[in-house]
Amino acid sequence: MFKGFKEFILRGNVIDLAVAVVIGAAFTGIVNAIVEQVFNPAIGALFDAESLATAFPVDIPTTSGGTATLHFGAVIAALIQFLLVAVVVYFALIVPINYLKRASFAKKQVAPEEDITTPPTELELLAEIRDLLAKQKAE
């Protein structure tokens, strides 16, 4: 029972997923701070708003006669945050891991031996069988 659990835990996919979750959680705090404290106020200033989260407000009427405000700037801020996380994860994790995989694969490749012959194709085998049968029939 423990052997199967050990094999499950030590699979590359499970470890990769665990690392991705931990790194993603760590980067989320950093990226949130950058987006909320740097990008949102800077982009909001372009649109004469306090921050991007309050930019692009749209007031819609409610059934009770009041208004509800939709803040499309908050959606744009979330998109910026997502893109920043994706860029950081790609360049900080994916690119180095792919490089290491390629380097490891190149080391594992062995030069093909020259005295290994390629097996005959199915057509060649059938032709040889035909020739043997014809020779046997002629005798």
Image (spheres, rainbow, N blue to C red):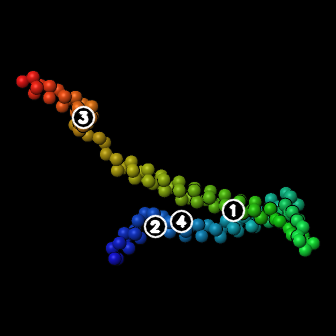
Residue occupying the far top of the picture: 138
Tell me the distance, in whole angstroms, between the alpha carbons under discs 3 and 1: 58 Å
Residue drawn at x 48%, y 56% as measured from the top left: 97
Tell me the distance, in whole angstroms, between the alpha carbons under discs 2 and 3: 42 Å
**Secondary structure category for the residue under label 1:** helix
- Disc 1 marks a residue whose amino acid type is Gln
Quadrant of the image containing the C terminus? top left
- Is 127 situated above or below 74? above
Residue occupying the far bottom of the picture: 2
**Secondary structure category for the residue under label 2:** helix
Residue 116 is situated, as x and y percent measured from the top left of the image, at 23, 38
- Disc 4 marks a residue whose amino acid type is Ala
Q: Is residue 29 left or right of residue 48?
A: left
For discs 2 and 3, the disc positioned in front in the rendered view: 3
Q: Name the mark on residue 81.
A: 1
- Is 70 situated above or below 118? below
Residue drawn at x 34%, y 77% as measured from the top left: 1
Q: Is residue 14 left or right of residue 31?
A: left
- Disc 3 marks a residue whose amino acid type is Pro
For discs 1 and 2, the disc positioned in front in the rendered view: 2
- Disc 2 marks a residue whose amino acid type is Val
Tell me the distance, in whole angstroms, between the alpha carbons under discs 1 and 4: 17 Å
Of marks 3 and 1, which one's residue comes earlier in the chain?
1
Tag 3 residue: 120
Looking at the picture, tell me which residue is in the foreground, 65 or 91: 65
For discs 3 and 4, the disc positioned in front in the rendered view: 3
Residue 19 visible somewhere in the drawing: yes
- Is 14 situated above or below 110? below
